[in-house]
Amino acid sequence: MRQEYPLGYRLEFDFGEVKLEIAGKVRTYYLAVLACPASDFYWAYLYTNQKQEVFQDAHVQFFEMVGGVYHEVVYDNMRNVVSRFIGRSKKELNEALIKLSLYYGFNINVTNCFSGHEKGTVEGRVKHIRQQCFAKAYQFPTFEAAQGYLTDQLIRLNQPSQIVEEKQHLLAYRPPFELAQIAQCRVNNYSHIQFESNAYSVPDYLVGQTVQLKVYHDYFVVYAHHTEVCRHQKIEGSHQYQLDIYHYLKTLMRKPGALQHALVLKHSPDLKTLFDLYYKEKPREFLEKLDQYRELPKDQLLHKLSLASLVPEMKLPSTKAEAITDAIEADWQRLNRLYGLERVYS
């Protein structure tokens, strides 16, 4: 039987799959889709899995975006919703979902088994998003580029919706639900921590100490002595490394000769290429330049290191060497403006 719901009352949730080619590799990604039957507004977030932390993250992002909470959220019997079945009709709800619903104040409505029509709006929107957004465009340089593209398409597709009016009927806004899980790791002699079968670097002064982690679905923040010291994007897979050369500067400045074969340099191919081309015989200068330009974005850092390598090897005060570098950069930028040879940095 056809149902009609008042604005702000009902929200439906479902996961869908989509195959994308990102950075040359084809794999399955997951769409967390939320649809509002009354206003015909729908939204989706792209993830690499369907774990509980992803499931919750989609809710938090959506409520934050619309500035309020729906009275009821409807789900099927996915594992993120139902922990186990008791007999033929009773269901034990997932504890994490119960906490989320209590915090935001929405009611949980779980459909009957094999009854997709009971949340037909979101079922249809999963297919619609796949067809409208990813039927033709499925190749992206990065995961972030795919996420940005999806957002742009959803803004376009939702122009006819009544979401502006519906926002006036939502439950009151709540600050974002804290999704972080807390963990502890010990820093080994290589200034690595092992987390979920992967190795991540931390600043080298922390060797031998225990650090605390606030873990989110796609990244984590590392704290030592109640102070944030670094953060890392989570690695997809296992037995891999994510190393930051700045975590080792203090050690490398004491032993610059160790840089040439250092694992951390091999894990930054762009920096290694510049080092091998211009700084192999002067590793200390390379490290000093890294420290000097550490606040710059990666592309500008590489640009500065390339320019610095063009300064003739002569004994000059640092201010004079910097002046020569600036003059070279000014000439490059002038040629760039004339001929469009490469990106110009301001």
Image (cartoon, rainbow, N blue to C red):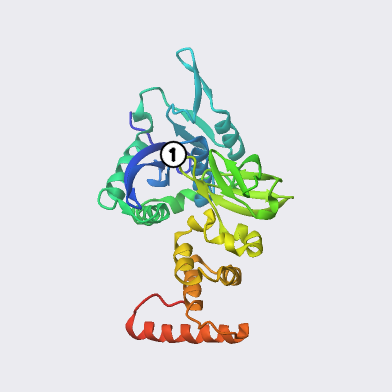
Which quadrant is the N terminus positioned in? top left
Residue bearing the label numbered 1: 49
Q: Position of residue 285 (x, y in %)?
A: 58, 72
Q: Is residue 196 above or below residue 116?
A: below
Q: Position of residue 303 (x, y in %)?
A: 47, 73
Q: Is residue 222 above or below residue 11?
A: below
Q: Secondary structure at mark 1?
A: loop
Q: Position of residue 270 (x, y in %)?
A: 45, 63
Residue 179 visible, this orientation: no
The structure residue drawn at horizontal position 46% and vertical position 41%, both measured from the top left corner, is 237
Residue in the foreground of this view, choosing between 95 and 272:
272
Q: Is residue 121 above or below residue 136?
A: above
The structure residue drawn at horizontal position 52% and vertical position 84%, both measured from the top left corner, is 326
Q: Position of residue 201 (x, y in %)?
A: 59, 51
Q: Amino acid at mark 1?
A: Asn
Residue in the foreground of this view, choosing between 249 and 256:
256
Residue in the foreground of this view, choosing between 309 and 282:
282
